[in-house]
Image: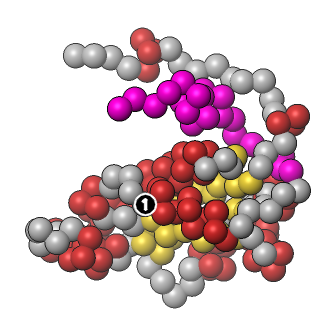
Amino acid sequence: MQLDDRSLDILFRNAHTHSAWQDKPVSDDLLRQVYDLMKWAPTSANSSPARIVFVRSESAKQRLLPAMIPGNVEKTRTAPVTAIIAQNYEFYEHLPRLFPHADARSWFVGNQALIDTTAFRNATLQGAYLILAARALGLDAGPMSGFDNDKVDQEFFSGTRIKSNFLINLGYGDASQLFPRNPRLDFAEAASIL
């Protein structure tokens, strides 16, 4: 079944990266709905390595802001929520439950290169899925690099095998502050069919 044009516009064609936000809260329930939607999207061997911290409270924002580059401080401070997308480098410990029809855990134990690649690639995918889930549920998103990963990891993931990947500001964007839509590469510039 194909989505209608309105749905495709919401997810892709009319969606923008937001940096300015309306003063409108995002509820716990809506954040749970976003996660519960994005979790169904595919990862290799159902590895599901993403770990997400939804930074919403003022005290949590104050812990996050010192890690931001100057150009990302205000947009993060004013966003109703900032999602830290991270990857758990011990994701394979959950594979007996998440991928029970094979001994997938044994594929990773002792193979750090495979662990690193799988964790980073699939957590990145899950972060992208989170953006689409948020848009599908009426939120706007502003994904970002531009922060000190080590500071974020020390502040939010100390003592774990979880490392930050990227951030996504979430909320209800202020469309009056958007830049005009930037162009994208045409099919022939970025893709081929062999």
Asked whether, in this view, residue 152 is left or right of residue 7, the answer is right
Q: Which residue is mark 1?
A: 39
Rendered position, 22 above or below 157: above
**Mark 1 crowdedness (10 Å alpha carbons): few <14, some 14-19, many ≥20:** some
Residue 19 visible somewhere in the drawing? no
- Please provide percent x and percent y for residue 77: 84, 62
Q: What quarter of the picture does the N terminus occupy?
A: top left
At a point 27% along the width and 55% down the height, the residue shown is: 44
- Could you say which quadrant of the image residue 193 lies in? top left
Asked whether, in this view, residue 126 is left or right of residue 166, the answer is left
- Please provide percent x and percent y for residue 126: 45, 55
- Please provide percent x and percent y for residue 3: 46, 31
Asked whether, in this view, residue 154 is left or right of residue 191, the answer is right
At a point 48% along the width and 63% down the height, the residue shown is: 36
Colour setup of the view: secondary structure
What segment is highlighted magenta in the picture? 1-22
At a point 44% along the width and 79% down the height, the residue shown is: 161
Q: Nearer the viewer, residue 108 or 7?
A: 7
Rendered position, 117 above or below 54: above
Q: Nearer the viewer, residue 28 or 59?
A: 28
Q: Secondary structure at mark 1?
A: loop
Q: Nearer the viewer, residue 111 or 17?
A: 17
Rendered position, 170 above or below 107: above
Q: Residue furthest left?
A: 102
Q: Residue furthest top?
A: 188
User: The residue under label 1 is which amino acid type?
Assistant: Lys
The verdict on residue 45 being magenta is: no
